[in-house]
Image: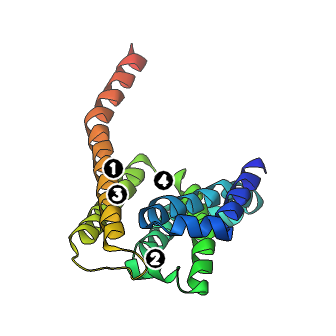
Amino acid sequence: MRQFLLGLVLLIVLALPPVARLLESIMIVHMHMQMPLLVLSGCLMARLFQLRYPAFFTKWNHNGIPGILLFTLIMVYWTIPKTMDETLTLQSAEWFKFLSLPFIAGISLRDSWGRLGLQGKHTLISIFAVKYLGMGLLYVNFPEQLCNNYLLLDQLTLGWGFLTTSVCMFIYLGYVAIFQPYANRTAHHLIDS
């Protein structure tokens, strides 16, 4: 219950008009801070739903793949420049963002992450690393504004933010690929001896 309340308070604070306007006024903060915090609020609230409706989650998301696909679909939707731009001009798009990111993406991610195996988690990180690389290249190399409500400099900054995040994800995946087999061999050696 404490996690649920923490997530709910975070969602309410993010939805306050002055806070929402402040976070949405800078493109990179809108994409790389407000949206992940909305997903985090859903992750925190998800535990209560998992405890109240365990049969639902077990039936529809028993291996984590349906939930991760739903999470990925919502996250891809919100990285499309036009949809991000619409949240600043259409009240319905803003409401959809504040409902879909915590209550669909956040809850799906929390329920699915524990059900996925290590390979599934690394696959998801790989997909997002490639997606962020593509979005970064698009935002950096496109010569015109992709979002009418943001300056070209904001677009460039967001592009570099995507590229930096992508590079960090690739570094993590490389680290895991190099050191995970070594860690497994060491663990097996300690268990055998």
Q: Earlier in the sequence, mark 4 or mark 1?
A: 4
Gap between marks 2 and 1 measured at Cα? 23 Å
Which residue reaches farthest top?
Answer: 193
Q: Earlier in the sequence, mark 3 or mark 4?
A: 4
Any mark on residue 116, and which? Answer: 4
Front of the two marks 4 and 1: 1
Q: Earlier in the sequence, mark 2 or mark 4?
A: 2
C-beta proximity under 8 Å, tags 2 and 4:
no
Gap between marks 1 and 3 measured at Cα? 12 Å
Any mark on residue 161, and which? Answer: 3
Camera-side residue of 165 and 148: 148
Identified at 31% across, 52% down, the residue is 164
- Give the percent coordinates (x, y) of residue 9: 73, 57
Task: Sort mark 2 into few (<14), some (14-19) or many (20+) by Cα contacts within 10 Å.
Answer: many
Q: Is residue 127 visible to us here?
A: no
Gap between marks 3 and 4 measured at Cα? 28 Å
Q: Which residue is mark 2?
A: 84
Camera-side residue of 2 and 136: 136
Quadrant where the image shows the C terminus: top left
Front of the two marks 3 and 4: 3
Identified at 39% across, 17% down, the residue is 190
Gap between marks 2 and 4 measured at Cα? 29 Å
Q: Quadrant of residue 187?
A: top left
Q: Which residue is mark 1?
A: 169
Task: Sort mark 1 into few (<14), some (14-19) or many (20+) by Cα contacts within 10 Å.
Answer: many
- Image vertical order of residue 125 relative to residue 151, above or below: above
